[in-house]
Image (cartoon, rainbow, N blue to C red):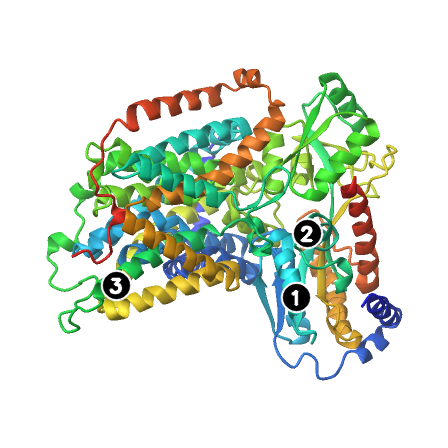
Amino acid sequence: MLDLSLMLAAFADVFTPTNIMFILGGVILGQIVGAIPGLSIIMALAIAVPLTYGMDTLAAIAFLISVNKGGTVGGAVPAILLNVPGSAESAATTMDGHPMAKNGKPLKAMKYALYHSVTGDLASDIVLILLAAPLAVVALNMGPVEITALMILAFTVISGLVGDSMIKGLISAAFGILVATVGLDPGMATPRFTFGVLELYDGVPLTAVSIGALAMSGVLVGLLSMRGSDQKTQSSAISMKGRTREQSVVTFAEYWANRFVAVRAFFIGTVIGAIPGLGSTTAGFLSYSVNKQAAKDPEAFGTGDPRGIAASETANSAVVGANLIPLLTLGIPGNIAAALLVSAFIIHGIQPGPLLFEQQAQLVYGMFGAMLVANFCNLGVGQIGMRFWAMVVSAPGTVIYPAAMLLCFAGSFVITGASFGVYVMIVSAIFGYMMRAFGYSIVAFIVAFLLTPQLEGAVVRARLITNDDPAALLSHPIALALIAMSIGSIIYLGPRKKKKPLDGDLQAPTGQ
Amino acid sequence: MKILPSLFISMATVGMTAATAFADTCPADYPGGNINFLVGFGAGGGTDTVARRVASDIEAATGWTIVVDNRPGASGGVMARGLLDSEADGLTVGVVSNTTVAINPHTNADIGYTHEDFAYLGTGMVLNYGLVALADAPYGNLEEFVDFAREQGRATISVGASSHTIAVTALAEHFDVDLVAVPGQGSAAALQEALGGHVDATIQGAAHVPQIEAGAMVQLATLTANRASYAPDTMTAMESGVDLSIEGHIIFIMNGDTPADVQSCLADAIEAVTSSESYIEFLAGQSAVPGNMGPEGTAAWVADASAFYGDRLAQ
């Protein structure tokens, strides 16, 4: 299947000065856009697609893929330094990334994020290159019945996120489910809890909720803790000064220590990425939860544990390569970024579909080569970029908090293109603040909110397809296996473990 | 209010019949500022792609500045309602689908507009919907598919839009057979379910064409008035005796209070773009055609479609 001479020719296509320049430029643009919470990679790609009209096909595709890859690295930067995710997919990175930065290791946290992000990306690209066809078959077998079972399994991991009180954790998750039911129901399109507000028909926007509940509420806690304190002794929220080598460098031993976490995260990210429509935010949170449950000392997660960063960043980056599996093998875009790649292909007269490999093999292999090159550019640009970002946030809290607040407002405005997102963000911030104050897990809330629409849609479709006949389950062995795993997950990983009250999302950003 | 659109239509007709007269009707000082294209759907979708392409082509041809912005929500409904509050100065254009203007007002009590509240500038792309199934399914045309459904007791069809659900209901009623529409998140998800064999067929606009060319899928019926160019042997639903013809259009709209001469500026510009060779080629890559119906044709088509969907949904 792999034609070596064709691959070599295709890789040679990539190594032209023009292509390398576009890849480098794309990565830099992606990292900057990803790092600014107000700007989304999707918007950057949508604007960039028409610009590639005059470019050579391979250069155009390589440029767009590089922007996308840069974005997955960039999003982690503000998540770690400001506790504000640059994009929704890096929301899970805030949970350990920001505490580690506050512990005096901001550069180290960013390096963990960068290395694991690039590792996840690279590994999923290799899987895409070698195993796209068999994985596409697996993904096609995931119908509504199987997705329902997968979502049930995903819900069981919430039990690992509930914090010190199971009852409070379940209340948080139930609240997330309630908020997720706002909008048109997926079966009959009947409005629920919309109260005549047209903007709520598509549900409460996820990014605005996560910015409000995770980031803005943290800014509120930080601002309140600054009240009355002496301005002169008020130091930076994150100090970049006086750091030792141990605090700013990630050794190979430290990186290698996370290998089991990274493998689990990579597996989760690749599977979720290969199935259209689930997305990298889901992958990040799921991986974080699974790895926290699997750890011997789950209470360390949330206090600045490198495993938390590795879990989130490896998984959300692994989605990027895997998302292209359904696109390249079947012509089905797995997410919006892949859909934009389709329009770039189309602009250059290529219609992605089942015949893409046969008709455009050299281009596809060239694209693979560009992806590999882009990963290394990502690493290099990230290494240099983080020093710049670190300088930006070395400012005192009186500067950092208002800046973070501005980003929260801008980010939630851009999502809806109107003030509606800002209102949602403010309301979520107030709820998030109260949840922190009373010890309810915000992460359990967000994960339940994120998974519910996918579970509900799958249940509706599964019921229609099986005609409400439970016996039909017997012809879905994958679904049965997933349900058995869910039961096992509840029994062996669930309430049995008593967690200590150290959940990261319950901590104020300026605890010390 | 209700008289105004027909007045615009008659003025636009004059413009259509004599292109030079059309140019005269556009005020010389237009636009006098940036033009805003508000897309009623998210970045990266089909509507967004067409809006951005048309905007950049108009910019190149006229030198005007067009800012494209996404205002997703309620199938374009959030943007369309906001458009009615915008100034009727011809600088704010909505880019929507037929669902926004012809279906939303019937299904959505809070929408606050009808199709008559807007001025129509033209259309940018027509999707020729088809009923498609896996090539190795035990049916290769509509008749065999209906027989299969009758034998099995039911058949499932994955759909990506509410107009498709209406088409499934119409087919089921006509043949008196149990056809179940399985609603999903857009047509890509619907296609995936059909390719995985989880449903018996799907309704698609364009994404299925490469599958047909690769021999993976077969078109059971074409749901538009004319046969599809990529499946010339497949009969239309109308040829099979079903009174059903659905098309998807990407439509350019404005606040209905906009003066007719100002409307003509952009209607003219859109007409020029959609008839250009490079634009037609761009759509051909997506197995689609512009099918621009012009201002009065679009208004008439939307009125017809609205009446059709209103009838079907009232049942």
Which residue is at the front of the view, A415 or A19?
A415
Q: What whole-number distance in Å separates the C-alpha atoms at marks 3 and 2?
A: 44 Å
Amino acid type, mark 1: Leu
Mark 2 belongs to which subunit? B
Task: State which quadrant residue A330 falls in.
Answer: top right
At label 3, the amino acid type is Leu
User: In the drawing, what numbered circle is on residue A415?
Assistant: none
User: Alpha-carbon distance for marks 3 and 1?
Assistant: 41 Å
Residue A25 at x, y percent in the picture: 41, 61
Secondary structure type for disc 1? helix
Q: Residues within 10 Å of mark 2 (few under 14, many from 20)?
A: few
Pick whichever of labels 2 and 1 is earlier in the sequence. 1
Q: Secondary structure at mark 2?
A: loop
Residue B105 at what x, y percent from top left? 72, 53
Residue at image mark 3: A224
Apparent side of residue A180 relative to residue B236 in the rendered image (left or right): left
Towards the viewer: A324 or B183? B183
Q: Which mark is residue B109?
A: 2
- Report which quarter residue A143 is drawn in: top right
Amino acid of disc 2? Ala
Residue at the far bottom: name it. Answer: B29
In the rendered structure, the residue with mark 1 lies on which chain?
B
Task: Look at the picture and state if B124 lies above or below A287.
Answer: below
Residue receiving disc 1: B83
**B61 in relation to B231, above or below:** below
